[in-house]
Every structure is written in structure tokens, then in C-alpha cells.
Amino acid sequence: MTKPTTLDSGIASRRETIFLLSRWLETYDFPNRMLTAAADRGFIMDLLYGCVRWRRALAWVLQQRVRQMPEGEAEAALLVGAYQVLYMPEIPAYAAVHATVAAAKIGSPRAAGFINAVLRNLERQRSELLAALAQQPLGVRLSHPDLLVTRWIARYGAETTAALCHWNNTPAETVIALLPNQETAMPPPALVPHPAAPAVCFTVPHGTRVEAVPGFAEGRFVVQDPATQAAIELLDIHPGQTVLDACAAPGGKTAQIAARMQGQGRLIAMDKHDDRLVLLRDTLSRTGQSWVEVVAGDAVAPAPTEAPLFDRILLDVPCSNTGVLRRRPDARWRFSVRRQQKLCETQQALLISMLTRLAPGGRLVYSTCSLEPEENQQQIARALAATPAVRLVATTERLPTRDQTDGAFAAALERTP
């Protein structure tokens, strides 16, 4: 956990967190897009993500001591303070409450006394409240929506579901993956080999900016969990091929593909969002892969290119993100049957569209960071039924509690020569 550097910065960082959290409570926008380049950015991120991650449990605890929850910044301040008192024992509770109340007073001066009284009460009764929380149903005590908990219990059983929820509530470490041929060029000091791929993936110490890791500026690695390696391996890339990365941003997988092609052949990296194209170009430039063709386009209805058919297509589709809830704690609160149905419609449209761009004998890899069969195995079954000229070559699935990686799914499909 990254701590604020001074008392004043501690108040400022909590003030910023309260502001950002109140925005998230109102808009449910992506928290990572709200973060600014503040001096205590690491601490602010820890606080913000922690409050989002534990929101349901925090709300339950506060409801035991608050007759009616306030709204806006006052609610956000209570959540920020409660998270520190309950889940950040490394920070003295009295200091956390003092700084949070001081920060709340800036935006909600009338509510500051009320916030102080509630948080001091939580501080005094912390053990009692945590014991009561531990007796609540799984979704409450581990802060997940009942819809996901019910689905996972039906599929994995109660014990594995509890372990998965615990995993999702563990702040995610940053993992880097070396690009091909960089294994000996970059001895990674202070980095820990990841058990799922110790030769190529390394965990960055918490609080270390990835830009400060040796080899970043030289483009020797990308930020990438070992779970994503399976999709690249299934793609079976060789120099000289014509390849499409259909939903390419932010570019980690594109860089892996480009490195394997060794500058030989043609690689088109496509994405429909202009802001994500900026990230994609930055990644390719940093890793020395500027030869890759970056294009704006929608893979559901891509514009014609000089190479209408591809030897290889990577289709990393938008999904519910249920395999990466450690990294995307907000995604758990967006999951719904209706949203998943819309995602599945998009996924199937993308898959059918991209199969029409696959050359005879070519291979397409469909991948998600979802654990849900509707987005994974069932999508492949539907595509195979609709496209007789395509066969399934292999599938791979990563489950966090089994593999100690992000959750992921990938399937390789080939068109008949």
C-alpha cells in the first residue's frame, strides 16, 4: 500500500478520493479513467479501488450505525473512512479518521460532524462490526453481487466461489511479460518471476511505477498477465503471415504478435475507439514495432483492405470482465443479465464477421477475460453451427483460483483449406 507523504498530502489525497468516489457513485464510469497525475496517485488509487471493491460490505457496516445514508460527497467520505478503519490496519485508525474528516469538511462542511461521529463509532466498534459482517451471506461479507455469486456456486460450488471472491478482493499486482528474444537481454532486478510463467512474466513490486522498471523505455516488455499468453500461443504466429489483430488496443497482444513476426509479413492492428488507438500506437512505438499498420475500424463491419483475407486473426472481444475483477473491481457492479445478453450479441456478431475474413487454412483465436460460459464455450458452439467450413482446433481456460492468474478463455478455429 502506498502511503501519503505528509499529513497535508494525506488530507489532500483523501479529498481527491472522496471527490472521485462520489463521481463514480453517480456515474459508474471507469475508475481508472478518473485518476489524475496527483502526487499521491498510488495511495489515491488504493483508496478508490478499495472502496469500489468493498462497497457492498462497507455499505452493510455503515447501515448498522447510520439510520439513513447521505448522498454525494458525504456518502463517499463515509465509505472512504470506513474502508480505512476496516480494511487498512496499517494506517492508525485515529489518523485515518482525522484526515478523512478534514478532507470531508472541505466539500461537505455541514456533514463533517456527522461523518466524524460515525467514523469514530466504527473505530471503537471495529472488531464487533467485522465479526457481525463475517456472519452475513457470501455476497455481503465478500462484497459481490448475488447474481454472480449464485452463478458461480452453481458452476464451481460454494468453496471455490468463496475462494474466487477472496481472490477478486485482493489488490492486483502489476505483471510484465517479456517480448520474444528479450529473456536474456533484461535481467529484472527486484522483480519476482510469476509462478504461471516464470521465464517470461514478472511481478512488479507494489508502489513501483512500471515506467521505472528497467527495460520499459527500450520496449523489452509489455504489461500483461500470464493468462493472456495462451491466446498468443494458440494463434501460432510465423514470420511472413498476413495477420489481423481485430480489437487491438491497448496493444500488448499486438506487440507480442509483431515480435513473433520479426517484421516479416503484414500485421494490421484495428480498434474502433480513437482514444484507445492512441494507447495502441504508443505501445507499438515504445516496443519498436512501428511497422505495424494501425487502422480505425469496427470488426463487426470492417472496411475493405488490400488484404481481404488473413492467415491469422486475433479477436479479443469486449466482455463482462468477470475473470479480471481484481483489476477491474467496478465491473462486478455492472454485471447484469441484460448487459451480458447485449455483450453476447456483440461477441457473436464480431466472431461471425471475422470468420468471413479468414483465409482457407487460416486460424482465428477468439479470446475473453470472462469466466462465463455464455461468452466463451457457448459462443464457439454457436459459431461452429453457423459456419460449417470452420473447425475447432483447441480451447484453453484459466481460472484464478486454480492457475493464480487472471481468468481468461481462448479458442482456436480454423477454416477448411
Image (cartoon, helix red, strand yellow):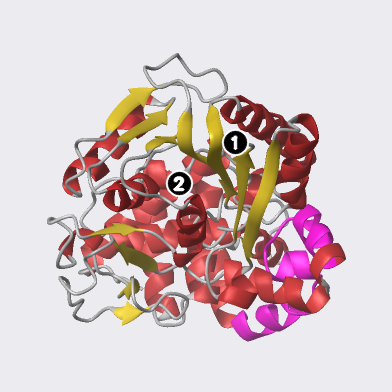
Question: Which residue in the structure is indicated by mark 2?
Answer: 31
Whether 209 is drawn above or below 264: the answer is below
Image position of 6 (left or right of 97)? left
Q: Quadrant of the N terminus?
A: bottom left
Q: How dense is the environment of label 2, judged by Cα within 10 Å: few (below 14), some, or many (20 and up)?
A: some
Image position of 121 (left or right of 189)? right
Q: Amino acid at mark 2?
A: Pro
Image position of 227 (left or right of 262)? right
Whether 309 is drawn above or below 402: the answer is above
| Percent position of residue 63, x then y | 71, 61
The residue lying toward the viewer, choosing from 331 and 239, is 239
Q: Secondary structure under badge 2? A: helix
The residue lying toward the viewer, choosing from 313 and 100, is 313
Q: Quadrant of the C terminus?
A: top right
Residue depicted at x 78% and y 43%? 381
The stretch of residues the image draws in magenta is 125-153
Question: Which residue in the structure is indicated by mark 1?
Answer: 417
The residue lying toward the viewer, choosing from 55 and 10, is 55
Queried whether the magenta region covers residue 127, the answer comes back as yes
Q: Amino acid at mark 1?
A: Pro
Asked where in the image residue 25 lies, by quadrant, the reply is: top right
Tally of marks: 2
Marking on residue 226:
none
1 or 2: tag closer to the N-terminus:
2
